[in-house]
Amino acid sequence: MKSKYKQQPEYNEKGVRYMMCQSGCCYISVGDKATAVRCSREVNAAIYKMFPEQNKPARVKTGRPAGWHWMAQFVDKDGTVYHKGIEVPELKGTLEPTTVKPTKKKATKRRTKEEILLAREAEKKEVLKKEFQKQKDLLSHKWGN
């Protein structure tokens, strides 16, 4: 019987038959009568191609700032009032929308190679100074003070 699949590389190890998947990325353990095999990567790619409308992002942004549900009081753009994330319908439309200032990100200053080397040398120098002072204290009989 002629197979419609191209013959894939295979090997046996400890009585288990392994066959390379059709894309050639990995080996998968198979049964004795298998003629071809596909890995999960290939199957998932085929599913995404078959159902593209289901590949939409799961999370839809609400437009509210991060942590709005932790605020003591938050008023949405449409006038909905929330107290600690729980809607209070009787106050809807009575308060002004909450204005949230965007947080400023601190610019991290990166040290240059030269600054790193200078700092390293200063640390070594400080250690040597301490060792030298210990030696001086030992010679002048001032240990333990």
Image (cartoon, helix red, strand yellow):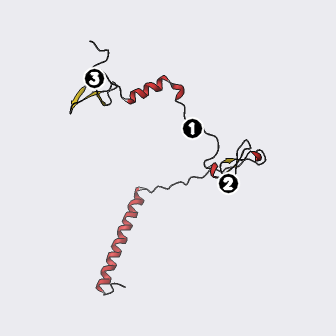
- Location of mark 1 (residue): 59
Residue 145 percent across, percent down from the top left? 37, 85
Which residue occupies 59% across, 37% down?
A: 60
Residue 116 quadrant: bottom left
Tell me the amino acid under the disc marked 1: Arg
Q: Residue at x 57, y 37 (%)?
A: 59
128 to 20, vertically: above or below: below
Tell me if residue 27 comes above or below residue 73 in the rendering: above
Give how far across and how far down residue 84 sits, in percent.
66, 51
Q: Which mark is residue 72?
A: 2
Q: Amino acid at mark 2?
A: Ala
Q: Give the residue at mark 3.
A: 8
Instruction: Give the CA separation, mark 2 to mark 1.
Output: 25 Å
Looking at the image, residue 112 lies above or below residue 6 = below
User: How far is mark 3 from mark 2, CA to CA?
Assistant: 63 Å
Quarter where residue 113 is shown: bottom left
Disc 2: CA contacts within 10 A as few (<14), some (14-19) or many (>=20) = few
Q: Measuring 32% from the left and 77% from the top, which residue is drawn there?
A: 132
Residue 29 is left or right of residue 68, and the answer is: left
Quadrant into which the N terminus falls: top left
Q: Mark 3: which secondary structure?
A: loop
For badge 3, the amino acid type reads: Gln
